[in-house]
Image: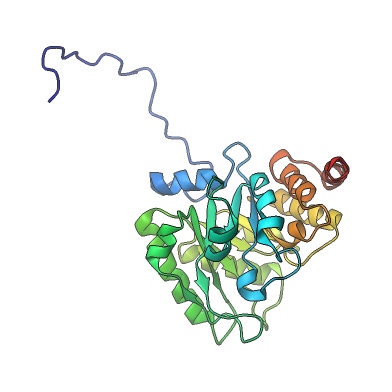
């Protein structure tokens, strides 16, 4: 019971200071609740507004692909240099030290590998998603794939329902349909479909006209790194995407398949957070590589 002998009337009402009604720093997410915003503020740097996500979820499709043969040796040392880790539950539990406090974007769908027909995925259990202490959840949609579009969109919508129930943002990973053109019109369609189905973040591919993809998508976009490119080309892609309005990258192979992964992720961070131009970032890459 409160001490009734020392009740003091409030005096500091700040009548000359109106309440802060400024917008949240990520577009389209001002109406999200506190828990959602708090998680997003761990994934995206509030100063730059951007993120460097390290993707190493490839194993559930590809197995021990180059650079992911040993997660404990190849990926764990990179974790401290990323803003967020995107991975499957298995590699997180077995290879990433729990003392690592980087936010996790959990790959929440699974089902098929490169040995069979892709995209026939199902979701993990809701309890498992929560148990992994996820700061975000990710699932794929296969827009333009007649066989799996409906199923993947249904999966994704259910995942958004789960995320909203627990204030966990959901990232839409846009898969490329075999018969769809790899251009801004298609990627804009896929990204917008993800946002319309409730995504808080959309992951898609950089292409010419990317500013249109960003403009028509009402939530932050991060670009996929895709296949391994020469370091300068990967840095140019990241730079061009940021200049077009992307809120960061979710890179995997262009980092962990580099001959100097730590140097590469630092160089990418220089582009994403510090506005380094590609050649400046390459100089950073070469400097860090030489020092190591």
Residue 106 location in percent, x, y? 52, 60
Determine the image quadrant of residue 253. bottom right
Q: Where on the picture, by quarter, is residue 258? A: bottom right
Please name the residue shown 51% across and 71% down the image: 109
Can you say whether 49 is above or below 54 in the image?
above
The answer to whether residue 73 is seen in the rendering is yes
Expressed as whole percent of the image width and height from the top left, the position of residue 265 reads 74, 49
**Residue 217: x percent and y percent?**
57, 59
> Is 32 or 224 nearer to us in this picture?
224
Query: How many labels, in total?
Result: 0
Q: Quadrant of the C terminus?
A: top right
Q: List x then y, in percent, for residue 211.
A: 68, 56
Colour scheme: rainbow
In the rendered view, does 127 fall on the left or right side of 290? left
Q: Nearer the viewer, residue 97 or 103?
A: 97
Is the residue 292 above or below the residue 246 in the image? above
**Where, quadrant-wise, is the N terminus in this rendering?**
top left
Q: Is residue 4 left or right of residue 180?
A: left
Q: Residue at x 78, y 50 (%)?
A: 264
Residue situated in front as seen by the camera: 224 or 207 = 224
At horizontal 45% and vertical 43% (from top left) the residue drawn is 38
Q: Could you tell me if residue 212 is visible in this image?
A: no
User: Does residue 38 sit above or below 86 in this rendering?
Assistant: above
> Residue 144 falls in which quadrant of the image?
bottom right
């Amino acid at each position: 019971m409160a001490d009734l002998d020392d009740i003091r009337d409030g005096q500091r009402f700040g009548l000359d200071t109106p309440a802060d009604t400024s917008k949240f720093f990520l577009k389209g997410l001002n109406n999200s609740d506190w828990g959602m915003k708090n998680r997003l503020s761990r994934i995206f740097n509030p100063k730059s507004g951007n993120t460097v996500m390290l993707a190493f979820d490839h194993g559930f499709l590809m197995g021990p692909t180059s650079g992911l043969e040993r997660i404990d040796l190849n990926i764990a040392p990179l974790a401290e240099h990323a803003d967020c880790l995107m991975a499957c539950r298995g590699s997180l539990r077995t290879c990433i030290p729990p003392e690592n406090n980087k936010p996790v974007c959990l790959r929440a769908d699974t089902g098929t590998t490169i040995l069979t027909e892709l995209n026939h995925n199902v979701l993990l259990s809701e309890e498992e998603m929560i148990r992994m202490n996820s700061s975000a959840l990710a699932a794929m949609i296969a827009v333009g794939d007649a066989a799996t579009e409906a199923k993947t969109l249904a999966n994704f919508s259910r995942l958004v329902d789960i995320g909203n129930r627990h204030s966990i943002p959901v990232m839409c990973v846009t898969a490329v349909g075999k018969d769809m053109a790899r251009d801004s019109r298609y990627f804009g369609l896929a990204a917008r479909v993800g946002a319309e189905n409730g995504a808080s973040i959309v992951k898609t591919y950089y292409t010419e006209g990317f500013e249109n993809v960003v403009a028509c998508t009402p939530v932050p976009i991060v670009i996929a790194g895709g296949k391994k490119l020469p370091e300068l080309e990967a840095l140019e892609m990241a730079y061009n995407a940021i200049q077009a309005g992307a809120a960061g990258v979710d890179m995997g192979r262009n980092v962990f398949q580099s001959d100097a992964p730590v140097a590469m992720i630092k160089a990418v961070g220089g582009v994403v957070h510090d506005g380094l131009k590609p050649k400046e970032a390459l100089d950073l890459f070469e400097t860090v590589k030489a020092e190591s």
